[in-house]
Amino acid sequence: MSNRLRGVLVIDDNASERGSIVRKLVGDGIRADTAQTATDAIRLLDESRYEVVVLNWQLPNGASVVSHLQRSGERTERIMLMTGDSRLPRSFDASLVKGVLFKPVDAIALSAHVRAMLS
């Protein structure tokens, strides 16, 4: 992995989980922005490009973030879902998502997956 900073957007309505993930990513030298809501995430995605989007799938309207990226044309973000459910909904488009981690998410494991997605 190169030493240049990479852009990750972490979207989770749980401040504690979001903070834990971001602290680990930043500690690993990865630039990370955060959003607490789907609306905030969509605004940030419209303003900036990220290499990886880490999304809490249970976030209210969380699916709208994936739909927004899909409708936005030539986007290159890789999506990593975090979920507490043992299965994803049938309507889920697996081609849009590059990884799934089940909650409770270990920040070290998530960081390893993100680093792999960035390389």
Image (cartoon, grey):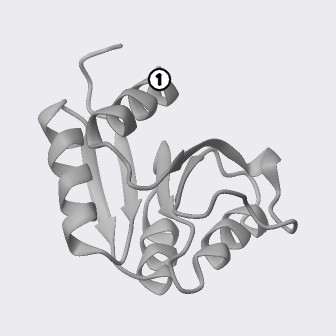
Q: Residue at x 26, y 51 (%)?
A: 21
Instruction: Give left or right: position of 12 versus 117.
Output: left
**On the rendered structure, is 10 left or right of 33?**
right
72 and 54: which is toward the camera: 54
Instruction: Rate crowding at label 1 as few (under 14), some (14 to 19) or many (20 or more) other CA atoms within 10 Å.
Output: few
> Which of the 4 quarters of the picture holds residue 13?
bottom left
User: Can you give x and y, in whole percent of width and height, for residue 10 in the image?
Assistant: 37, 59
* Secondary-structure class at tag 1: helix
Find residue 83 and report its horizontal and vertical position in percent: 54, 60
Residue placed under numbered mark 1 in the picture: 116
Q: Is residue 112 left or right of residue 21?
A: right
Residue at image location 43% in from the left, 60% down from the top: 48
Above or below, comparing residue 10 to residue 77 in the picture: below
- Residue beneath the point at 42% across and 71% down: 44
Image quadrant in which the N terminus is located: top left
Q: Residue 110: where, in percent of width, then height?
A: 38, 39
